[in-house]
Image: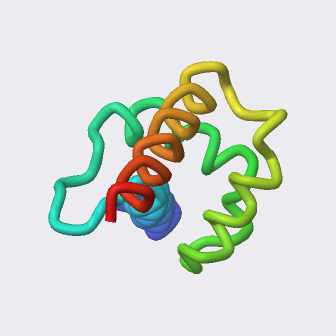
Amino acid sequence: MTFHRTSRIALLVAIACAATALFARPNLAFSSEAQQMCTGDAMRLCGHEVPNVQRITACMVKQRANLSPGCRAVMDREHAARRRAATAE
């Protein structure tokens, strides 16, 4: 493998992990739907923030209007679930 290809693969893995971390819930596995729907948006809109997960999260929130419809729907659903869980506590 060339250095360029290896670097690109490492970057894609880092972004995918960061994107899934956006939707992590305590004691639950990452949402595979969130990973599928938002990895491309995370790379396109917030790749410059890798590997800082907090900055990627803030960037994705700021870029909400520019997210793909699928990613936006997943983020909205996850946000609503977190609100319900916080209210139930």
In the rendered picture of this protein, how many numbered marks are placed on residues? 0
Residues 47 and 74: in front is: 74
**Image side of residue 21 versus residue 74, left or right:** left
Q: How is the image coloured?
A: rainbow
Where residue 11 appears, x then y in whole percent?
A: 49, 63
Visible residue check, residue 16: no
Q: Residue furthest top?
A: 69
Where residue 66 appears, x then y in whole percent?
A: 81, 34
* Point 39% across, 33% down: residue: 36
Residues 40 and 20: in front is: 20
Where residue 31 appears, x then y in whole percent?
A: 29, 43
Visible residue check, residue 11: yes
**Image side of residue 85 versus residue 68, left or right:** left
* Point 50% across, 41% down: residue: 80
**Up-down relation of residue 3 to residue 59 (above or below):** below
Q: Residue furthest front?
A: 88
**Image side of residue 2 versus residue 80, left or right:** left
* Point 41% across, 43% down: residue: 81
**Up-down relation of residue 54 to residue 42 (above or below):** below
**Image side of residue 26 versus residue 84, left or right:** left
Where residue 78 appears, x then y in whole percent?
A: 45, 43
